[in-house]
């Protein structure tokens, strides 16, 4: 058994440049953006709440060079299909292929009044796909930086993140929040990224140097994932709407206090109450986790992560057996501080805070425990927090 594959990424920009030259006959500029793992604050971003993710060492690289015509040619060696679009007649919604994330960004840049010239684009990535580590945000962010640069244009990173989120909302059709794109743009090596998803104010919270973020991939993704994401979002919006009857200042669940929620439990449909209950307490857990991490109290951060998982399982109901088994499998292993499911749920990964001296052993043991219980060999990635998006040449 080979349980642990270790981040960071081994992808070399020079290899991508060489491949680009073979295909397109010119030298590209290369940009990369990372995937992320969320330490705590799940499903809070689209409720105007708090999150604390970190960028990790899996990346999408986008190589780009100009063309003399008005075509946009998009390729990848990993995914099927060579795509060619006319920049003057770009689709305004998804075409149903992987290139949608590139195309969405291009289309929105153009709609926002950024002039675009013809381009050849080659995409390569090693962010595990469908694992809840934000491979799509990584493609969007790296593409946005590439197109802006090619056109001699500039946009603040926070604006790049917002544009990429809009591309996913309006072009691809997924109603995601701002967390993934934001941390992919602005993450910082060695730090967790505490973000207020309403004001977009953020604070970098140092992670102890001897802590690893061990990400355990259950290797399952249940079909429920995208439909249920939108249902949960709608339930939260319903909760905020109903509760605003008693406090008109409530614009989102971010504005609801635990006390107000308890007072009106019986005014809410049961499911809506459960969702609201998760969000209101999860926001508080993020604030507590920031304070505890700042004090170096990893035991407390670990407890908050465990509480978050139980809440996602029982109140928000976005966990699944594989995730629960993976979270349970970490208990009692040496060096383990705490862990939980991470990302949207219904499969994907757990994130675990583990002392670095124990990380390899932890990876081996958790993989064996999970395989014994579920019959699937997981992938385990030993990660650190990495820098956000950047140019590579
Ligand atoms: C997905 C979305 C994020 C966030 C998480 C859940 O990753 O892209 O915006 O809502 O789910 O926390």
Image (cartoon, rainbow, N blue to C red):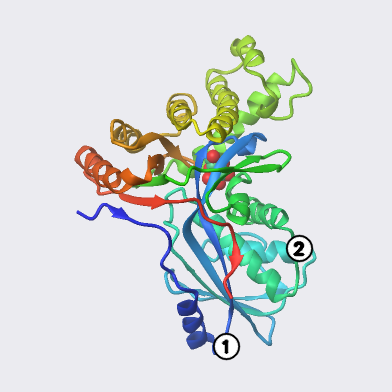
Image vertical order of residue 186 relative to residue 19, above or below: above
| Left or right: 3 in relation to 71 | left
Label 1 belongs to which residue?
26
Q: Residue at x 55, y 27 (%)?
A: 285
Image vertical order of residue 44 relative to residue 314, above or below: below
Q: Quadrant of the N terminus?
A: bottom left
- Marker disc for residue 322: none
Which quarter of the picture shows residue 120?
bottom right
Q: Is residue 339 visible?
A: yes
Would the CB of label 2 be found within 8 Å of ligand 1? no
**Of helix, strand and loop, which one carries label 2?**
helix
Q: Residue at x 67, y 22 (%)?
A: 256
Q: CA distance from mark 1 to mark 2?
A: 28 Å
Label 2 belongs to which residue?
111
Q: Residue at x 76, y 18 (%)?
A: 247
Q: Is residue 41 visible?
A: no
Residue 245, horizontal then vertical, whole percent: 74, 17
- Badge nearest the viewer, 1 or 2: 1
Q: Nearer the viewer, residue 229 or 122?
A: 122
Q: Residues within 10 Å of mark 1 (few under 14, many from 20)?
A: some
Q: Residue furthest bottom?
A: 25
């Amino acid at each position: 058994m080979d349980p642990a594959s270790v981040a960071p990424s081994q992808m070399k920009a020079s290899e991508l440049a060489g491949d680009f030259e073979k295909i397109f006959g010119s030298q590209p500029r290369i940009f990369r953006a990372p995937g992320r793992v969320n330490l705590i604050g799940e499903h809070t971003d689209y409720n105007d709440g708090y999150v604390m993710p970190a960028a990790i060492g899996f990346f999408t690289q986008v190589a780009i060079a100009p063309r003399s015509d008005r075509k946009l040619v998009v390729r990848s060696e990993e995914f099927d299909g060579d795509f060619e679009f006319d920049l003057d007649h770009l689709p305004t919604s998804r075409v149903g292929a992987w290139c949608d994330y590139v195309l969405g960004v291009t289309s929105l840049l153009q709609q926002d009044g950024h002039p675009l010239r013809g381009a050849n684009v080659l995409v390569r990535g090693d962010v595990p796909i469908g694992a809840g580590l934000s491979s799509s945000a990584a493609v969007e962010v790296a593409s946005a930086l590439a197109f802006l640069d090619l056109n001699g244009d500039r946009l603040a990173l926070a604006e790049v993140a917002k544009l990429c989120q809009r591309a996913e909302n309006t072009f691809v059709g997924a109603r995601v929040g701002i967390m993934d794109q934001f941390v992919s743009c602005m993450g910082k090596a060695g730090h967790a990224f505490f973000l207020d998803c309403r004001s977009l104010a953020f604070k970098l919270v140092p992670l102890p140097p001897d802590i690893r973020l061990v990400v355990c991939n259950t290797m399952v993704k249940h079909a429920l994932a995208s439909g249920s994401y939108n249902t949960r979002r709608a339930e939260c919006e319903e909760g905020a709407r109903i509760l605003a009857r008693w406090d008109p200042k409530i614009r989102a669940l971010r504005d609801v206090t635990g006390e107000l929620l308890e007072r009106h439990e019986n005014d809410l449909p049961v499911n809506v109450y459960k969702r609201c209950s998760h969000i209101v307490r999860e926001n508080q857990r993020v604030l507590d986790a920031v304070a505890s991490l700042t004090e170096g109290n990893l035991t407390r951060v670990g407890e908050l992560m465990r509480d978050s998982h139980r809440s996602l399982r029982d109140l928000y109901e976005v966990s699944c057996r594989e995730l629960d088994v993976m979270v349970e499998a970490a208990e009692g292993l040496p060096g383990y501080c705490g862990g939980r499911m991470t990302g949207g749920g219904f499969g994907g990964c757990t994130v675990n805070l583990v002392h670095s001296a124990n990380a390899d052993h932890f990876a081996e043991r958790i993989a064996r425990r999970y395989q014994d219980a579920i019959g699937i060999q997981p992938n385990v990635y030993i990660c650190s927090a990495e820098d956000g998006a950047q140019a590579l040449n």
